Image (cartoon, helix red, strand yellow):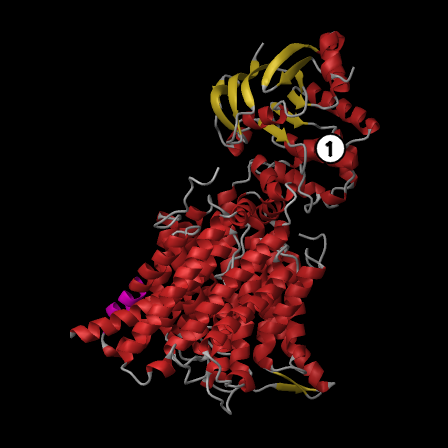
Amino acid sequence: MTVVLEVADVRGGYGGADILNGTDLKLDEGEIVVIIGPNGAGKSTLMKAVFGLATIRSGSVSFFGRTITGMRADQVAKLGMSYVPQERNVFASLTVNENLEMGAYLRDDDFGPQIERIYELFPPLKERRRQQAGTLSGGERQMLAMGRALMLDPKLLLLDEPTAALSPRYAAETFERIREINALGITILMVEQNARQALEHADRGVVLVMGANRFEAPGPELLANREVAEMYLGG
Amino acid sequence: MELGGVIEYGLFFLSFVGIYALLSLGLNLQWGLTGQFNIGIAGFFAVGAYTSAILTTAPSPHHLGGFGMPLVVGLIFAMVLAGLVAVLVGLLTVRLRTDYLAIATIGIAEIIRLMLKNEEWLTNGVRGIPGIPRPFAETLGAGTLGQSDAVFLLVVVALILIVYLALEAARRSPWGRVLRAIRENEDGVRAAGKHIERFRLEAFVVGSMIMGLGGALFAHFVGFISPEAFTPEFATFLVWVMLIAGGSGNNKGAVLGALIIWLVWTGTEFLTSMAPPEYVTQAGALRLLMIGILVQVILLVRPDGLLPEETAERK
Amino acid sequence: MTDLLQLLVFGIVFGSILTLGAIGVSLIFGILRFAHFAHGDMMTVGAYFALIFVAQIGWPIYMALPAAMIGAALLAILIDQSVYRRLRRTAPVILLISSFGMALLLRAAVQLIWGTDNQVYQPGINVPYVVFDIRIKPDHLVIVGASVILVFAFHLFLKMTRMGKAMRAMSDNVDLARVSGIDSERVVIWTWVIGGALAAAAGVLLALDTRLNPQLGWNVLLPVFAATIVGGIGRVYGAIAGGMFIGIATELSTAVILPAYKPAVAFTLMVLVLILRPRGLVRGMN
């Protein structure tokens, strides 16, 4: 199996005290891996560190065997990794279609067919293609955010709390979409507050505590683990 | 140049340094300590100058007053009026972000300049106010000019000392610590339950009062004021260059910056005076150009100034 | 009534000029997050660039205008790359100080090169058309026409081109723009190209309406800022509405107060907007 992403003993944060204290992570091609853990455990920071948005003080990150530690975000994006932030993840004043165009900013070829594929994956977006993204509902916004990230045809997609602001119905739907995206051959790493549901859809779960991994196991196994269930899945 | 001339020039030079040092100290309280961006110094400077001039000159049919009052009254009211204008500006802008305060202060300064030009009943318009008395002019009688310069310099130095010591005490006081904390981390201070707007307003008003005092002293030093003297170039920009060069956040730096930049400024006058006479009208522009370049160089090379803020006291 | 309509004409003319300046200030604020205090003096420099082409080469104004815009765009890039770019890593307020210094530096350079006397592009009287007792000078039509064309061209640029969209994206959400791989340095350079060029156009048109002198742009900096803020700072389309609003309001105000206080009127309106609607009069649009 090809290793897509390997994070080795990463320490760092945003310049102040370290938030990540020796985090390890390994993703195989085609996997869905979910990171869970208490607030402030460094889940989002880990994602940002991978994508070049947080400072890595020591340790290394590699993507398909290539070291990307300390690379700028746009350089990382060029290599085939996309990132969907948790908040403010669409250009609110741009139209839906323009948001997707911005997602393809690094592409020099004709990305028209890719936009059509995104609309096939998220049909509600097509109806609203000329509408400003700021007018979309929470669920549609999340679709657009993912659509934007998929415009570069990434091999790895990072999702920071994709269901955080959504109602349970939309959350379930979003997990379905994530599986569809995964079925296209895209490896997925996500952070989820909605841990129980996320683990049901994931191949593997990683529990992050105080910036270091505490547990790592296939989804069902973690769900069955009593300690994990009590401490991090809300009983 | 004979010795008497040198001394006379020295007194003249240092008096200007003193006046600018007061402006720079006032700005340091607003910007250096509190992080408030005032680029309308000229406005507070002008209010101070005109207030004291109108109060202390002999009665004139050309402008309001004069009221022939003692100099001390002039100085006090110069501070009070500059403070009142600052309260007005401050109340309007204290909640707004830095850019808005900057725009608001420059707006007020421009409006004050327009009023000085157009409200002839008050200021005699562009013709200005002459005959503004020197300190202790009556007691000294009609002595030589040098004597009067020396006395003036003493008064300025005494006032700088008072202001400097007061500002240093304020900086070290709990009040000063709150101001710095606001500058560094506004939300943190707010969370600690402090009324940020009040602290900001206080610093802004006190800083502006010091600028008003500087303006009054300027009026009494040169003896004649007109709107020309209160352009943003001379009354605002030079002060900023002084504070940045000296080291914002540091009161010693504010005074040192006034000395050095006034030296440079005078030096550019000396340089441009050597140019052929047909270029004499361009000389002023050339001096400003040099200072304009100097400030960019300082910002690029030594943004903390010659005497950076003492960081040991900070956490 | 005629008087008010006459003032309305002046207001539309002045508003067309302010709009061009305000678009630049708003765009620069949206992308770089600082109020550009040298914008008025950038207008002045642009106006004098056009004078070179008119007076020395003998070009008509409609050729000198684009030439001056190109010149000012290049100057803006030069200023950004030599000074602002190096200060961008520090606090935005340092850029504010620097741009204030740059304002005086540019003005001093203009005085040094072109002197302090009033100058005009073309001597002679601009004979006005009289329509229902309202006097409209040919230059007024040129000013409003040029402004409309430039604003429309800018609108097309924002809506149709990849760089225009990237600009809107970056001013909307810098972090997401970076995540999407948008090259922020290129966007910044284009911001200066457009800000500088439109400032030059505003300066040329203002000089056409009045006279060239080194204070030309500085004197309207306050109304330009007022227009920007009234329109909602950082919102390019708001700047158009803000420019027309401030232009018309200040001209109409001369019916009751001294014309010398026009900047004060603009300032008062701006302060009122800041207090009552801190996010500007125009909502939603970027």
Residue located 69% across and 41% down the image: A97
Determine whether A133 is above or below C28 in the image: above
Q: Residue at the front extreme?
A: B139
Q: Nearer the viewer, residue B41 or A19?
A: B41
Q: Nearer the viewer, residue B294 or B182?
A: B182
In magenta segment, residue C132 = no
Say which quadrant the N terminus of chain C sits in: bottom right
The x and y percentages for residue B49 are: 47, 74
Helix, strand or loop under label 1? helix
User: Which secondary structure dominates the residues rendered in magenta?
Assistant: helix
- Magenta range is B264-275
The x and y percentages for residue B38 are: 51, 60
Residue located 58% across and 54% down the image: B200
Determine whether B137 is above or below C36 in the image: below
Answer whether residue C62 is visible to the viewer in this image. no
Q: Residue at the left extreme?
A: B2
Going by the numbered disc 1, the residue's amino acid type is Met
Q: Nearer the viewer, residue A161 or A81?
A: A161
Residue denoted by label 1: A143
Determine whether A200 is above or below C275 in the image: above
The x and y percentages for residue B259 are: 32, 61
Q: Chain of mark 1?
A: A
In magenta segment, residue B270 = yes
The x and y percentages for residue C149 are: 60, 65
Residue located 64% across and 25% down the image: A40
